[in-house]
Image (spheres, rainbow, N blue to C red):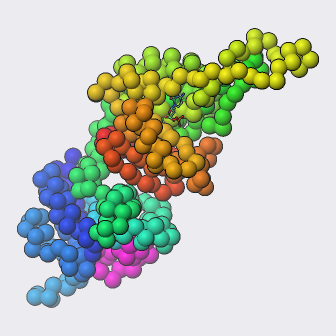
Amino acid sequence: MLKGKNIILGISGGIAAYKSVTLLRLLVKAGAEVQVVITPNGKEFITPVTLSSLSGRPVVSEFFSANTGEWHSHVSLGVWADAMIVAPATASTLAKMASGVADNMLVTTYLSARCPVFVAPAMDLDMMAHPTTARNLATLRADGVHVIEPEVGELASHLVGRGRMEEPEKIAAVLDDFFSEKQTLAGKKVLISAGPTYERIDPVRFIGNFSTGKMGYAIAEEAASRGAEVTLVSGPTALKTSHAGIRVVDVESAAEMLAACRAAFDTADIAIMAAAVADYAPAHPFDHKIKRETDGIDTIELVKNPDIAATLGAMKRSNQRLVGFALETDDAVAHGRDKMARKNLDMIVVNSLADAGAGFGTDTNKITILTNGGGEYVFPLKPKREVAVDIMDHIERI
Ligand code: C5P
């Protein structure tokens, strides 16, 4: 999909600039025309000769050419491009982009770009975690810039944390997806569980939880919008979906949810278990309303519910992908990894009740994606609709 596309590759001054050479090579190999715009600091990390040799175009860095005195027009570049990707985007470049400090060709070009703009941040973990950086990224997002989240891993400082630039192959894939007009999940069947389960104590009482189903429904909408045929097995929620690609199977209890999920799993390519399934159910539900005077119970005997995700994990074929969720209150990542292994999942989405705005009932969520290949991706607080996009993007890559 990158064939014939005009792409501006902005490179700012970070050690991850060495990866931009690979990114440039991948974009050129895919048939894109790439114009490199590099900041003065970027040139300290990577030489323009390497970049111009690979792109087949002189690298733009200064406002004026020292030899000819010629002025480089950022305006014509901004009009020429189908997309602009800034990789690496340092804290300083992000700050300048967010506030419009156009003191170099890269930011000036950004300000005149009419095309979609992507940034792949790369910096030290403390700079990444600084509220200033978070604020600048939030501003850029609000301005419509696509942020390709950095990974957690070892940094140039040898410290381990969030701030590693996403790998060039993945950045190229993000751009490719963006230009792809085809529906990336066309012909795929996706099974999604959502909402709480209700475990009956008697005809009027149940054991349940505070899940609203918002996250699972948002994922269902996103998968359907990518052309998937979605089966949404939903516990009791107040939500509705009108997407033609979504078939809703309403269930109440964990046992019903298991039966519906098992039935749909066989033909599913991807299964995403976003439901908050009750761990226990009353062993002997009453068939009449329990009366204080005559029934006189003060304990309810419970039995363990089946683990739906683990059941599907045991049935999983090698061409199927199974994704779970883990809502944790402490040590979220370690518990998430443990669950992923125990349930034979390919990916797990971890969120913590300790994060404000994350978890049940909110319209936002703050997630970390863990993949069974060892990947760990931390995302900022976002609307659940956008979180669903991040989740589906990652599922498509595993
Ligand atoms: O073990 P825990 O309940 O935290 O695991 C959460 C993940 O497992 C979620 O994906 C959830 O939908 C799934 N799960 C399940 N059946 C259960 C319990 C959890 O499918 N009985």
> Is any atom of residue 221 visible in this view?
no
**Could you tell me residue 130's position as x and y percent?**
47, 71
**Could you tell me residue 391's position as x and y percent?**
42, 43
**Could you tell me residue 276's position as x and y percent?**
57, 33
Left or right: where 169 falls relative to 220: left
Left or right: where 43 falls relative to 324: left
Q: Which residues are magenta?
A: 91-112
51 vs 116, nearest the viewer: 51
Please identify the residue farthest to the right as the structure is shown. Answer: 293
Circle count:
0
Q: Is residue 92 above or below residue 256?
A: below
Left or right: where 73 falls relative to 391: left
- The quadrant holding residue 96 is bottom left
> Is any atom of residue 270 visible in this view?
yes
65 vs 277, nearest the viewer: 277
- The quadrant holding residue 250 is top right
Which quadrant is home to the C terminus? top left
Residue 190 covered by magenta stretch: no
252 vs 277, nearest the viewer: 277
Q: Main secondary structure of the magenta part?
A: helix
- Residue occupying the point 56% across, 27% down: 234
- The quadrant holding residue 163 is bottom left
- Residue occupying the point 46% across, 67% down: 129
361 vs 350, nearest the viewer: 350
